[in-house]
Amino acid sequence: MSRRELREQIFKLLFRIEFNTLEEMTLQQKLFFEDDCAADAKDTEYISSKYQKIVDKLETIDSMLNEKAENWDTARMGKVDLTILRLAVYEINYDEDVPTGVAINEAVELAKKFGQDASPSFINGILAKFA
């Protein structure tokens, strides 16, 4: 898979957190790889690893988002937008392999594909504060 495809799969898996408890996510992750994600062993490991790293920092990431997003907090954000922002903020702050500009651009592309009409500009505006 390309990096863009891998990022999209991480987004899809991370999105499930909004509808399941963290305890249920072990089963959800298993189901995701069985039913929804046609990844080889190497890609599965990459997706799982990055997903877990994001989950481990979720509280910190949400706190950072709440601090930077003026007049918004994570509880009010749309689930798709929030998931995209969590992935991007992780990449900007913790993933040295992903340049900030790439993280922002990829987040905007995910927003165009999965979000609402205003999602790309909303995502771009918040992530610009992290750049």
Image (cartoon, rainbow, N blue to C red):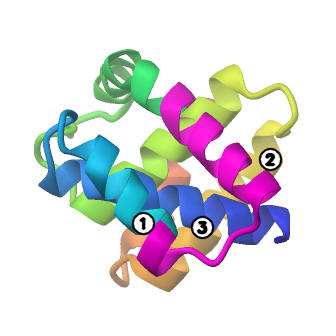
Residue 40 falls within the magenta-colored stretch = yes
| Residue 119 in view (yes/no) | yes
Task: Answer above or below: position of 52 versus 15.
Answer: above
Q: In which quadrant will I find the C terminus?
A: top right
The mark total stands at 3
Query: As shown in the figure, which amino acid type bears the numbered disc 1?
Result: Phe
Query: As shown in the figure, which amino acid type bears the numbered disc 2?
Result: Gly
Question: Is residue 83 left or right of 97 when viewed as pictured?
Answer: left
Q: Which residue is mark 3?
A: 8
**Residue 124 picture quarter:** bottom right
Q: Position of residue 38 (x, y in %)?
A: 63, 78
Whichever of callouts 2 and 3 sits on the residue coming sooner in the sequence is 3
Residue 72 falls within the magenta-colored stretch = no
Query: Closest to the observer: 28 or 14?
Result: 28
Query: As shown in the figure, which amino acid type bears the numbered disc 3?
Result: Glu
Residue depicted at x 38% and y 15%: 60
Q: Which residue is mark 2?
A: 101
For the residues labelled 1 and 3, say whether their Cβ atoms are less than 8 Å apart. no
Residue depicted at x 58% and y 31%: 90
Q: Which residues are magenta?
A: 34-53
For label 1, the SS is helix
For label 2, the SS is helix
Q: In which quadrant will I find the N terminus?
A: bottom right
Residue depicted at x 24% and y 59%: 79
Q: For marks 2 and 3, give the CA distance.
A: 17 Å
